[in-house]
Image: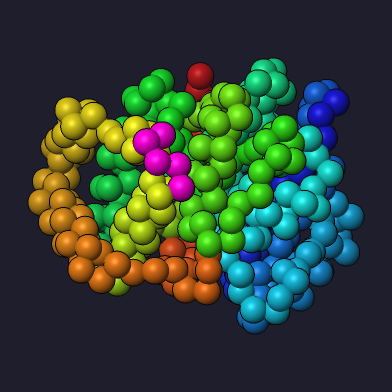
């Protein structure tokens, strides 16, 4: 029996924290896997997140609320360090607070490969964007589908892009030997590179699906793009040639995936690359930096999850499984 800890770093997630806790409490174990702990790490929230988590903790003893040692926001890297430090599980599965697991077996699908093969140090899940509602979200969804196709085809799925902060799992063999520097903006990629350097394997669990909301306005789209550019620069400064090799995507693969999506959505094929080029140019001019160490500005439009849509997705999945 392998003990598993679930971890949620959160900052001002009062509107979403109940949804994710409701979904995680319902996650199933089996004869090999037992969910023993659900840690919520409060990173300086001021919106009532703490009170909501405390109510849930009274309902399920596995739920534990921890706070950053400082009352101010420290950033996700520091929050993940705290979760790993408090974890009792041999495997820690980490979820963003603003995602919704597709069903009650997502944790099993995420950690089972690590139980079967202890040489796997990090296992990435599969974030899936909600349906689009406006032009900017349509463009953001276009970029998601392109990169989703790229990551599934690159190195058989076991690549840097398969480890996404919205859902991934890490073995204690890695977490006990690594502490993420607080200033690191992308703790998921940092752990990916540490896993490689420690001689462990990375796995992509394509069926461990969580849904999330894409950016819904130009400000948030550009904010995420600029943050990503900063993130890549930071990775290369830390890991050097290893990072340069891993972030490189074969041009023919990228073009092929982009054109395939362009056949479905010609408008986004024109708009998305234009915005990408503008964001790269703006980044080179401004050289933005994270605020307060590893903390960074929040894209607020991604926080408004469509819980009605996830209910429809779950129903559709059940009907599909039944037909099979």
The foreground one among 259 and 178 is: 178
* Main SS category, magenta section: helix
Vertical order, 276 against 159 (above or below): below
Q: Is residue 240 magenta?
A: yes
Left or right of 148 in this view: 89: right
Q: Residue at x 40, y 50 (%)?
A: 237
The foreground one among 36 and 87 is: 87
Q: Residue at x 21, y 58 (%)?
A: 280
Name the spot of residue 224 as percent of width and height, x first: 36, 61
Q: What is the quadrant of residue 231 in the picture?
A: bottom left
Name the spot of residue 168 as percent of width and height, x first: 58, 41
Q: Residue at x 65, y 21 (%)?
A: 119
Which region is colored magenta? 238-242
The foreground one among 22 and 87 is: 87
Q: Quadrant of the N terminus?
A: top right
Q: Is residue 291 magenta?
A: no
């Amino acid at each position: 029996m392998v003990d598993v800890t679930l971890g949620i770093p959160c900052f001002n997630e009062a509107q979403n924290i109940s949804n994710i806790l409701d979904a995680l409490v319902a996650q199933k174990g089996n004869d090999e896997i037992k969910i023993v702990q659900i840690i919520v790490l409060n990173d300086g929230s001021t919106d009532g997140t703490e009170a909501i988590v405390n109510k849930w903790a009274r309902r399920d003893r596995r739920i534990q609320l921890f706070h950053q040692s400082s009352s101010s926001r420290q950033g996700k890297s520091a929050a993940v360090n705290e979760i790993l430090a408090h974890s009792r599980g041999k495997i820690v599965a980490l979820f963003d607070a603003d995602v919704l697991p597709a069903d009650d077996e997502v944790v099993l699908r995420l950690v089972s490969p690590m139980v079967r093969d202890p040489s796997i140090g990090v296992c990435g899940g599969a974030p899936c964007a909600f349906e689009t509602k406006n032009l900017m979200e349509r463009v953001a969804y276009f970029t998601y589908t392109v990169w989703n196709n790229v990551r599934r085809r690159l190195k058989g799925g076991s690549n840097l892009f398969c480890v996404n902060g919205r859902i991934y799992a890490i073995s204690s063999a890695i977490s006990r030997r690594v502490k993420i520097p607080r200033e690191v903006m992308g703790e998921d990629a940092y752990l990916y590179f540490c896993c490689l350097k420690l001689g462990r394997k990375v796995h992509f669990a394509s069926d461990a699906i969580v849904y999330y909301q894409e950016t819904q306005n130009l400000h948030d789209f550009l904010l995420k793009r600029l943050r990503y550019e900063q993130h890549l620069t930071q990775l290369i400064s830390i890991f050097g040639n290893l990072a340069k090799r891993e972030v490189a995507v074969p041009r023919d693969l990228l073009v092929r995936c982009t054109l395939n999506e362009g056949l479905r959505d010609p408008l986004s094929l024109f708009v998305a690359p234009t915005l990408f080029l503008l964001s790269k140019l703006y980044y080179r001019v401004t050289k933005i930096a994270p605020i307060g160490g590893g903390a960074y500005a929040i894209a607020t439009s991604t926080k408004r999850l469509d819980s009605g849509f996830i209910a429809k997705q779950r129903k559709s999945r059940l009907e599909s499984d039944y037909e099979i």
